[in-house]
Image (cartoon, rainbow, N blue to C red):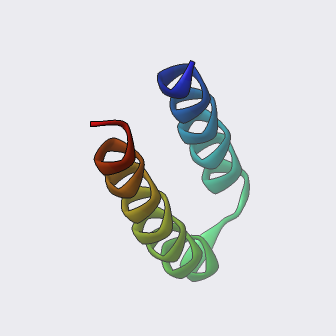
Amino acid sequence: EFLKTWERALFFLTSLLLIIPGNICSSIGLFLFIIVFYVHKKGIKIMG
């Protein structure tokens, strides 16, 4: 269940980044990636 949510969130972020052009995409993308990666790491720790 958790993995499905993770994949869906990742897909959503990817498609969102494809829509936003230019430098805004880069900075927002990096910011979102850090947040998502942190949450993902924390989620694994909580689960296992």
Above or below, comparing residue 26 to residue 47 in the picture: below
Q: Residue 46 appears at what percent x and percent y? A: 38, 47
Q: Residue at x 51, y 81 (%)?
A: 27
Residue at x 66%, y 41% (from the top left corner)? 15
Task: Indicate the quadrant where residue 4 lies.
Answer: top right
- In the figure, is residue 37 to the left or right of 12? left
Q: Is residue 15 shown left or right of residue 31?
A: right
Give above or below for 44 relative to 4.
below
* 1 sits to left or right of 30: right
Please determine whether, in this image, residue 5 is positioned above or below residue 28. Answer: above
In this view, the residue in front, 45 or 19, is: 45
Q: Quadrant of the image for the C terminus?
A: top left
Q: How many marks?
A: 0
Nearer to me, 26 or 34: 34
In this view, the residue in front, 17 or 39, is 39
> Which quadrant of the rendered structure holds the N terminus?
top right
Counting from the top left corner in percent of width and height, residue 8 is at 62, 29
Question: Quadrant of the rendered structure where residue 30 is?
Answer: bottom left
- Seen in the picture, residue 21 relative to 3 is either above or below; the reply is below
Query: Which residue does the image show at 54% across and 67% down from the upper left?
Result: 32
Residue 19 position within the rendered picture, expressed as x and y whole percent measured from the top left = 73, 52
